[in-house]
């Protein structure tokens, strides 16, 4: 009887040890946190590009200045389905601490209207103004049909938000 009790107790201890090692005694994985935003897949952007405007007279007293940015990533598909946003830097040549302004831009200075508009073509971004708007520009391209995972749209007028989304420092 002693021998049966010994074997039975060893079997119980072994069973109980095995049971505990596969249940509560194992390390518990931490709670899963909320899923974050996925960012902007396939988005492209340029650095600050120094653009010089050239003028052309359409008719007497009517001058239009044009700056051209070569943008090889700007395809017909992006023109048809995507988004392109351009900024100018009102802080002149300081691209380490820019004062970005989204285009199109319009204002009035001393009763004189000023504008700078964007026209897009495959591979090129044309900047059209009624004054010499030479300076630094940056563009962002989001291909169409690519979900960003965001539940909200990008506020292109808020450059600080754009910098955060794209992980930019300037």
Image (cartoon, rainbow, N blue to C red):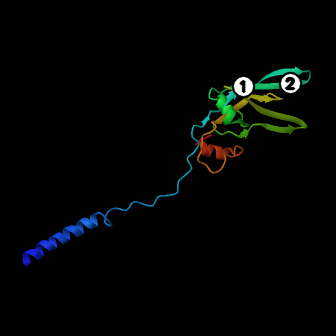
Residue 50, given in percent of the width and then of the height, sits at 68, 28
Lateral position of residue 155 relative to residue 27, left or right:
right
Give residue 133's mark.
none
Give residue 68's mark.
1
Residue 85, given in percent of the width and then of the height, sits at 69, 37
Quarter of the figure that contains the N terminus = bottom left
Residue designated by label 2: 63
Q: Residue furthest bottom?
A: 1
Quarter of image, res 22: bottom left
Quarter of the figure that contains the C terminus = top right
Bin the neighbour count of mark 2 within 10 Å (Cα to Cα): few under 14, some 14-19, many 20 and up.
some
SS at circle 1: strand
The residue shown at (79%, 33%) is: 116
Lateral position of residue 74 relative to residue 111, left or right:
left
The residue shown at (11%, 74%) is: 6
Residue 134, given in percent of the width and then of the height, sits at 75, 28
Residue 63, given in percent of the width and then of the height, sits at 86, 24
SS at circle 2: strand
User: Which one is nearer the viewer's eye here, 13 or 160?
Assistant: 13
User: Which one is nearer the viewer's eye here, 112 or 145?
Assistant: 145
Count of picture labels: 2
Asked if one can make out residue 66 in the rendered structure from this viewpoint, the answer is yes
Asked if one can make out residue 94 in the rendered structure from this viewpoint, the answer is no
């Amino acid at each position: 009887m002693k021998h049966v009790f010994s074997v039975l107790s060893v079997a119980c201890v072994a069973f109980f040890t095995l049971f505990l090692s596969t249940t509560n005694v194992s390390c518990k994985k931490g709670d899963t946190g909320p899923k974050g935003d996925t960012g902007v897949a396939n988005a492209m952007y340029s650095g600050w590009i120094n653009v010089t405007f050239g003028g052309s007279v359409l008719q007497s007293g009517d001058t239009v200045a044009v700056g051209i940015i070569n943008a090889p990533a700007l395809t017909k598909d992006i023109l048809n389905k995507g988004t392109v946003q351009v900024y100018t830097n009102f802080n002149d040549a300081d691209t380490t601490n820019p004062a970005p302004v989204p285009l199109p831009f319009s204002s009035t200075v001393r009763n004189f209207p000023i504008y700078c508009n964007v026209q897009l073509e495959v591979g090129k971004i044309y900047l059209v103004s009624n004054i010499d708007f030479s300076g630094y520009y940056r563009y962002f391209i989001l291909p169409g049909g690519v979900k960003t995972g965001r539940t909200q749209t990008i506020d292109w007028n808020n450059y600080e938000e754009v910098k955060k989304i794209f992980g930019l420092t300037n």
